[in-house]
Structures are given as C-alpha cells and as structure tokens.
Image: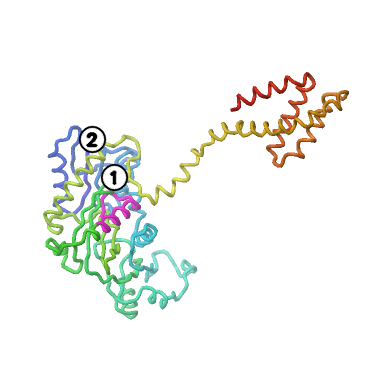
C-alpha cells in the first residue's frame, strides 16, 4: 500500500478535501491521510510514499522531519532542500536569466545588525550605501518588502526617499528589497502543479483578502493568457516546484512576474472560490497519486529544477565522454599514417641496392633518419619509424613479398 500524507497547519478546507478526493477514487494500492508524527529517527524511512507539505515554512521541526523523510525515499512536495535555499530576490535574478520580465529590484541590508555581530562584521559593506544610485535605478513610487517570506507581510508602498528611510528604520533585522512599481491594468495569480498544470486566475491584490480573486472579470486575449501560461511553466521548471503560484502584473500588454516563491499557496475555498478550489483539489490529488505510483522505495524521489540540474549536469556527463570510441579510433588513425609512411618509404627502399652490403641495422638507421624529414607531427614520425623498420626487415628477406603483406594489412585496416 502506497500512502499519501499531507502535513498542514491552520488551514481547514483544503487538507481534508485533498484526502477525501484521493480515497474516493479508490485506486488500488493508494490511500491518503493526514501525516502523524510520534518520533523522528535519523535516516529511518517514513510510512509515506508521498507527503504534501503545507506548513514547514512556519515550523522548523517539520522541515527537518521532511528532509529526513526525503533522504530516505519519500517524495516530498515541495522539495524541502530547495525550499530552504530559495528566496524572492534570487527568484527575480533567475527569472531574468530565464527570459521572464520582472520589475527592477535591489537588495537592501537590514537596518539593525543580526544578533552576535558587531561593526567589524560589516567591514565589507560600504557606508553610506549609494542610495542616490539605488533610488534613481528603481524610481518612486516603489515597494519595499522582505527578500524572503510571503503573505503580504511587511510590505510598504513608498513615494519618496524620506518615506523610504522612515519605513526602513522600522524593519529591524529583516533583509528587505526595493522594487519598481508596476502600474498594471490586469493582474493574475496562477496555480502551477506538477510543473505543467496551470490555472490562471484574475486577481486584485488591492482588495481585502477574501475579495481578491475575481470571478466575473472582463474577457482576456488568448495571446496574453498563452504568454502568462508559458512564463508560469518556465519559472516553475527552473525552480523545480511541484505546487506553487505565480503572480503577474500586466503593464502595456507585458506580464511582469511579481511573486513566484509561494510553495504553500492559499487554497482555501473561502478565498479562492468554489471553481478554483475544485480545480486545485482535483489536480493536487491526481499529481500525488501519479507520484505515489512512480515512487521508488529507498531512492531519491524529489523534484529538482533546471537551475540545479543544469548546474550539476557537466559533472555527471564527464564519465560519458565517449573515451571508448576514441580508443577504438586510435588504430584507424595510425593505419592511414602508416600508409603514407609506406608510400613515402618506397623511395628509400628503391635505393636499397646501393647499401646491399650494409647490415640490416644500418639500413634501419637510414630509414629512421629519412622518415622524419618527410613528417611534421609526432604521431606521423612514430608511425613512419615503425613502418620503415618493418619495411627494412622485409627488404632483407625479399623485395616483392613485403608489398603483398602490406596490401593485406591495408585491407584489414579498411
């Protein structure tokens, strides 16, 4: 029996609906339940083939449990190692490299020093920073928000430098980023599950939370929706998230990715609405079932994005450098050289009668000396030497027979 578990916190509607949907399908060898933890032993596998993580960003104990489960073979969605490493500022940089438009953004040091640090800990940081250059690059109005985190917490809209310094002084040890404002005429929030299942939802971030999902919005162009879908898939392929949302603000027909580090996105029926809720429950259930069926016990069953996979690909490809074919080709390379050497060596052989009384070794010496003058590479010289010596040995016996033998060698090499 392959178990699918869901790890969750304060949300109420999605987890149980997810469990019920899987069990209702009655797929042979598959069942779902809420994850229950009574002990965590290092390197011990869990009873789950798949775990959907909806809470570990807020509970470090759960994050450690999931990493232990993943290394022991559980397919954890989303990958807890990548989730721990990811943050929004890096997301923006990766989006640019992926070809997805994003607002201009800069990273800011925290207003207060981290615990257990002193002024000496920041000797590599210029003071004051180039605030004028930063403000000129971003412009005002602008938004300031944490470089990691979510839920629209600690987000400030700033109209000038004075407002920036006033609000930044209130952020304590938070690492913030300053971002260009995108004045939009359309805004979307997009579910992306399994890397290719996309649900585009019209969204109004300026409304109260329960009114942000627009259910009767104006019609939209197919070209715009296709672009939004394409960008959503590209970003999640690079990041490697199995369950994520991407937000886009559309300015002058161009969708700018605003927020796409949401590995535990809102899926509550009371906020997303019945139709979106039905889609995310059904799609998440099918995704989890597929992963359970593909699960390989004791092996790594995590999803990794192309950013990581492409980074390690050169290392994994080195053993497959096709060394074996190169070795097989080596004799073939020498043989043609030998042919040339034999052809060229015929001239010194033709003068052999002049040195009939000389010992065979002396002839070999002359052949060696004559060959380098007609070759330009080390490989050709070596081949020529071997050929000349062979030719001389054959000459001491007879003059005609070596030609026949050489012909046989040629046909073999072909």
Q: Residue at x 82, y 29 (%)?
A: 351
Crowd band around label 1 with a 10 angstrom C-alpha radius: few (<14), some (14–19), many (20+): many
The answer to whether 100 is drawn above or below residue 21 in the figure is below
Question: In the rendered image, which quarter contains the N terminus?
Answer: top left
From the top left corner, tell me how far across and down residue 205 is, in percent.
20, 66
Crowd band around label 2 with a 10 angstrom C-alpha radius: few (<14), some (14–19), many (20+): some
Label placed on residue 2: 2
Label placed on residue 76: 1
Q: Residue at x 28, y 37 (%)?
A: 294
From the top left corner, tell me how far across and down residue 128 is, in percent.
44, 76
User: Quadrant of the rendered structure where residue 33 is?
Assistant: top left
Tell me where the magenta segment starts and ends, as one range.
226-244
In the rendered structure, the answer to whether residue 30 lies left or right of residue 353 reads left
User: Quadrant of the rendered structure where residue 29 is?
Assistant: top left
Of 85 and 62, nearer the camera is: 85
Q: Mark 2 and mark 1: span between their CA atoms?
A: 14 Å
Q: Is residue 237 magenta?
A: yes
User: Quadrant of the rendered structure where residue 190 is?
Assistant: bottom left
The answer to whether 216 is drawn above or below residue 25 in the figure is below
From the top left corner, tell me how far across and down residue 3 is, in percent.
22, 37
Of 285 and 363, nearer the camera is: 363
């Amino acid at each position: 029996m392959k178990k699918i578990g869901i790890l969750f916190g304060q949300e109420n509607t999605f987890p149980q609906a997810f469990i019920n949907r899987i069990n209702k399908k009655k797929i042979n060898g598959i069942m779902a339940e809420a994850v229950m933890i009574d002990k965590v032993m290092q390197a011990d596998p869990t009873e789950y083939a798949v775990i959907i993580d909806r809470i570990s960003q807020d509970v470090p104990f759960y994050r450690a449990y999931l990493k232990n489960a993943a290394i022991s073979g559980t397919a954890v969605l989303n990958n807890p190692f990548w989730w721990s490493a990811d943050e929004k500022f890096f997301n923006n940089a990766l989006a640019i490299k992926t070809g997805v438009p994003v607002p201009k953004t800069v990273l800011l040091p925290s207003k207060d020093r981290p615990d257990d640090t002193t002024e000496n800990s920041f000797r590599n940081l210029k003071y004051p920073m180039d605030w004028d250059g930063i403000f000129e690059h971003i412009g005002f109005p602008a938004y300031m928000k944490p470089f990691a985190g979510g839920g629209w917490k600690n987000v400030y809209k700033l109209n000038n430098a004075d407002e920036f310094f006033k609000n930044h002084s209130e952020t304590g040890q938070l690492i913030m980023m300053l971002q260009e404002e995108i004045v939009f005429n359309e805004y979307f929030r997009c579910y992306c599950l399994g890397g290719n299942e996309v649900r585009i939802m019209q969204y109004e971030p300026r409304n109260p939370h329960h009114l942000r999902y627009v259910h009767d919005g104006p019609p939209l162009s197919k070209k715009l929706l296709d672009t939004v879908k394409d960008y959503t898939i590209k970003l999640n392929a690079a990041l490697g998230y199995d369950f994520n949302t991407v937000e886009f603000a559309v300015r002058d027909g161009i969708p700018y990715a605003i927020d796409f580090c949401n590995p535990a996105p809102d899926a509550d029926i009371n906020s997303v609405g019945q139709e979106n809720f039905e889609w995310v429950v059904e799609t998440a259930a099918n995704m989890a079932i597929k992963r359970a069926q593909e699960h390989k016990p004791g092996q790594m069953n995590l999803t990794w994005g192309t950013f990581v996979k492409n980074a390690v690909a050169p290392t994994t490809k080195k053993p497959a450098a096709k060394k074996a074919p190169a070795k097989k080709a080596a004799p073939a390379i020498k043989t043609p050289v030998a042919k040339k050497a034999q052809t060229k060596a015929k001239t010194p052989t033709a003068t052999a009668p002049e040195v009939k009384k000389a010992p065979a070794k002396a002839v070999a010496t002359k052949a060696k000396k004559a060959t380098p003058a007609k070759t330009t590479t080390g490989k050709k010289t070596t081949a020529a030497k071997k050929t000349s010596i062979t030719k001389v040995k054959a000459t001491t016996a007879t003059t005609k027979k070596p030609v026949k033998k050489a012909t046989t060698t040629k046909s073999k090499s072909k």
